[in-house]
Amino acid sequence: MLQIEGDVLTVPPFRIDRRTQSFLQRNALRIELGSLVPDVYQVLAVQNFWIEDTNPDLRECLAGIYLARRRGDGAWEEPENWPVECRTLATLGCVDTRIAGSAALLPP
């Protein structure tokens, strides 16, 4: 699913079904990793509350991506702890950015 070329992470379109709702990302997302603090990050699919959703089907919601960095105490950051208005749906993988220009995918 996830792909890396150099230090660009590509997340293809995805759909996550939960109970009676579906969370969609209809477009591939390309994320430049070079500007991040070198570290290991979880790639989280989140419900996206920031984008206006014009879809009249209330069973479908927009999804986005959040990169969660490991904190000093060993726990992962959680998007719910920041004022970014999103909720975690799934962990899609992990990315190691500690070697400049050659980020690597790791298992979730």
Image (cartoon, rainbow, N blue to C red):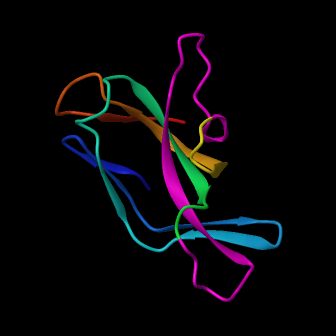
The answer to which quarter of the image holds residue 10 is bottom left
Percent across and percent down for residue 6 are 18, 42
The residue that appears at 82% across and 73% down in the rendered structure is 20
The residue that appears at 29% across and 22% down in the rendered structure is 98
The residue that appears at 83% across and 66% down in the rendered structure is 19
Percent across and percent down for residue 45 are 56, 52
The residue that appears at 59% across and 42% down in the rendered structure is 83
Say which of 87 and 85 sits in front. 85
Residue 105 colored magenta?
no
Residue range (magenta): 52-81
Residue 72 colored magenta?
yes
Q: Residue furthest bottom?
A: 56
Q: Quadrant of the N terminus?
A: bottom left
Say which of 107 and 90 sits in front. 90
- How many numbered badges does the structure rendering display? 0
Relative to residue 13, is residue 98 depicted above or below? above
Q: Quadrant of the C terminus?
A: top right
Q: Residue furthest right?
A: 19
Q: Residue furthest front?
A: 83
**In-image side of 19 versus 95 (left or right):** right
The answer to which quarter of the image holds residue 56 is bottom right
Percent across and percent down for residue 15 are 59, 68
Say which of 63 and 108 sits in front. 63
Percent across and percent down for residue 82 are 60, 37
Relative to residue 64, is residue 70 depicted above or below? above
